[in-house]
Amino acid sequence: MIVVTGATGNIGRPLTRALAEAGRQVTAVSRHAAAVPDGVRHVVADLAEPAGLKPALAGAKALFVLLSGDLHATGANPADIIGEAAAGGVRRVVLLSTLGVVTRPSGHTRIAMRALEDTLRESGLEWAILRPGGFASNALWWADSVRTRQVVAAPFGDVGVPIIDPADIAAVAAACLLDDRHTGGVYELTGPEVITPRRQAEAIATALGSPVRFHELTRGEAKAAMSQSMPAELADDTLDILGSPNPAELRVSPDVQRVLGRAPRPFADWAARNVAAFR
């Protein structure tokens, strides 16, 4: 049995599907009831309360940990998730971390994530750590404005980073869960090229087959919009990366190719597969 947390998100959904298609027994964990592939068990649990994972972990041999907002929850102790896994008989844990633990290690959330990485390394379990950069799926922030006004509004229109398709993260996670060769691996996951917001808008327009205008926001405008869905400190942190990526954040990593034997998918591929969100 393999347990997938965050199973209804942009990474968890394709990961759950890939594991089920590989013939593995899978338990999908999410905060709320949700549809899952046929044959997949679903358990509702909140990772901010790790003890609640016990029913999901019963009989499990491997666990994929995607914390999302749980890492920032008041009083959360994500290290307890590793403890619950070990106590429940799990042998292997694949942790979704962030590239920021090496590119900008001083931020509060990245310090916490690096501590969780260290807890996993010292747990005695088999492990692998995935460190993705920016996600292609963040472009869904623009879906409403593209549908209603045919516009992408974003700051730093001509500053890019090598964003990754979440489906590629899921594919790497599946490999790490299923293949002993990846035990002890730390993988930095990026897309195949640096791409700017302006070029992302062009790719969305191509996928739609209709024009999409790019409107450049000021940093202040972008922060005001982002602060509606995240803490202001995290919005500032994100804008620092988007506006002034450092050399490590601009680096195109070979790790997707190393694990999967193929190059990571470009943003245009993601846009074509998700074009319905922008119509």
Image (cartoon, rainbow, N blue to C red):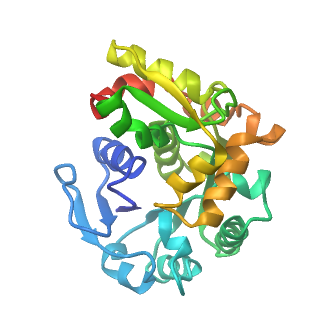
Residue 67 visible in the current orientation: no
Q: Residue at 21% x, 49% y: name it.
A: 37
Q: Is residue 8 left or right of residue 100?
A: left
The part of the image, by quadrant, that contains residue 163 is: top right
Where's residue 139, x and y in %? 46, 37
Where's residue 267, x and y in %? 51, 26
Q: Residue at 36% x, 30% y: name it.
A: 146
Counting the numbered discs, the total is 0
On screen, 190 above or below 77? Answer: above
The part of the image, by quadrant, that contains residue 43 is: bottom left
Q: Viewer-proximal residue, 124 or 14?
A: 14
Q: Is residue 265 left or right of residue 158?
A: left
Where's residue 4, x and y in %? 39, 60
Of all residues, the one furthest to the right in this rendering is 247
The part of the image, by quadrant, that contains residue 157 is: top right
Residue 269 visible in the current orientation: yes
Q: Quadrant of the C terminus?
A: top left
